[in-house]
Amino acid sequence: MKTVVLGAGVVGTATAYFLARHGHDVEVIERQPGAALETSFGNGGVLHASEVEPWSAPGMPLKILKWLGNTEAPLLVRYRALPKLVGWGAKYVANCSPARFERNTLANLGLALHSLATIKAIRSEVPIDYDMRTNGALRVFTEQQPFDAAARTAEKLSRHGLAFETLDAAGTVRQEPAFAASADRLAGSLYFPRDEIGDSHKFTRGLAAHCETLGVRFRYGAAITGVRAAGGRVEAVATTAGEVTGDNFVAALGSFTTPVLRPLGIRVPIYPVKGVSITVPGTAWPGRVRTCIGDDSGLYGLVPLGDRLRVAGSAEIDGYDATPSRERCDAIVRKVAAMFPDFAACYDPATALYWGGVRPVTPTGTPVLDRSPIPNLFIAAGHGHLGWTLGCGSGQVVADMVAGKPPAVDASGFRYANQ
Ligand SMILES: Cc1cc2nc3c(=O)[nH]c(=O)nc-3n(C[C@H](O)[C@H](O)[C@H](O)COP(=O)(O)OP(=O)(O)OC[C@H]3O[C@@H](n4cnc5c(N)ncnc54)[C@H](O)[C@@H]3O)c2cc1C
């Protein structure tokens, strides 16, 4: 049985790994010269079961309307993107009801917890150096009201398996001494002991190399230009490096799943939402953060990755272009420096790596992990801000579906029809 995986991001590569484990003959098609060179390259690096709430949340549509065109807004919708956003936007608004938000959050949580267990199992089998740390994540708050609201949400989610602790400002400093200089600004924090961090590019590259030892073939530098279907089946994908045939196909193309599948009449409503990261050498700041920090009011993540520090954030709706906006990068750096004055010692624009990627966001805020209306074509895409968190679990779920086995976790929240 030959399965062709389209896309070698974290999701496609994890799918290829589990398919190989099921004994499939696997070929992966990727337009870049290696694995995880697009959105899975420079993301925030956090495997965060603590962040499973979709961006389609009650109250969000009104906020987005108020932020329209404002370049300082946490979620910037550029006016020029509006015409293409209409259909997706209507579905997005429908998913902001409290009931759907809760349903989608719980679906993501189940998959995130499974995915954390899955990456642990992969680690025990495949030695990959990806700057991993398993010392949890801190979400810090400078205002009481959002802190209390987040604590209530975490309490609710703890009934479904999310582990957390509530810390006051002093407890936050005990957990992460780098906050000592800014403790008076903190209302407190939530500590999520099971969240992990790691470099998703290094992990995916390592997993791809391991897949090759299992017999998986990676066809890099091959851009998919079309999908050929006949008699209700996909027969082949056309690429710039020739046609690739197979028995089954898995589309794991992130945001690009939508345009590639559209000519087949398959409508996966994924919209690209651009984010940025700035990676700096961390050694100039001896007391640098050792724990992953998510600043709830600054809306950035600060993550130690080996001897580097990565700051990530920003959400911008402006089509498929992933070029990082220097203005948005600088705005985040200023926020980090305001909270951690010593961060400035690490930050030299000449050595900083500025990166941009497009999160593949669905209106539900949950990925699609399902067979498409064409029976031998499966979809593993739409992971939004959670692709690194959910990637390994998603790969296993979809590989199980392709192999005709019941998935290890309830996948009813990820149906194509839900979108
Ligand atoms: C700033 C930022 C911070 C983030 N932080 C986090 C975080 O901390 N934790 C977390 O869980 N998630 C985070 N995410 C989200 C996460 O990075 C994504 O959800 C995830 O990388 C998506 O993985 P993927 O495999 O679906 O897509 P991708 O990584 O985009 O993989 C798709 C692959 O398909 C290939 N491809 C596309 N079109 C074609 C074509 N026509 N032909 C051939 N190949 C093609 C691409 O080259 C790419 O390699 C962040 C995202 C951003 C932008």
Image (cartoon, rainbow, N blue to C red):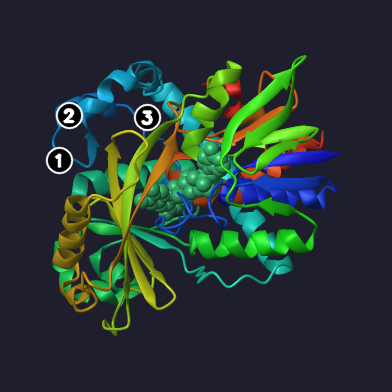
Residue at left offset 46%, top offset 64%: 136
230 vs 13, left or right, is right
Pinpoint residue 200: horizontal percent, then vertical percent: 51, 59
Q: Is residue 204 above or below residue 176?
A: above
Which residue is denoted by mark 2 in the rendering? Answer: 68
Which amino acid, mark 3? Ser
Residue at left offset 43%, top offset 26%: 363
414 vs 354, left or right, is right
Does dot 1 land on a helix, a strand or a loop?
Answer: loop
In this rendering, the label closer to the viewer, 1 or 3? 1
Which amino acid, mark 2? Leu
Pinpoint residue 375: horizontal percent, then vertical percent: 74, 22
Image quadrant assignment for residue 404: top right
Q: In the picture, which quadrant includes the N terminus? A: top right
**Disc sitting over residue 28 in the figure:** none
Image quadrant assignment for residue 342: bottom left
Q: Earlier in the sequence, mark 1 or mark 3?
A: 3
Which residue is denoted by mark 1 in the rendering? Answer: 71
Report how far apart the C-alphas of labels 1 and 3 lie in the structure: 21 Å
In this rendering, the label closer to the viewer, 3 or 2? 2
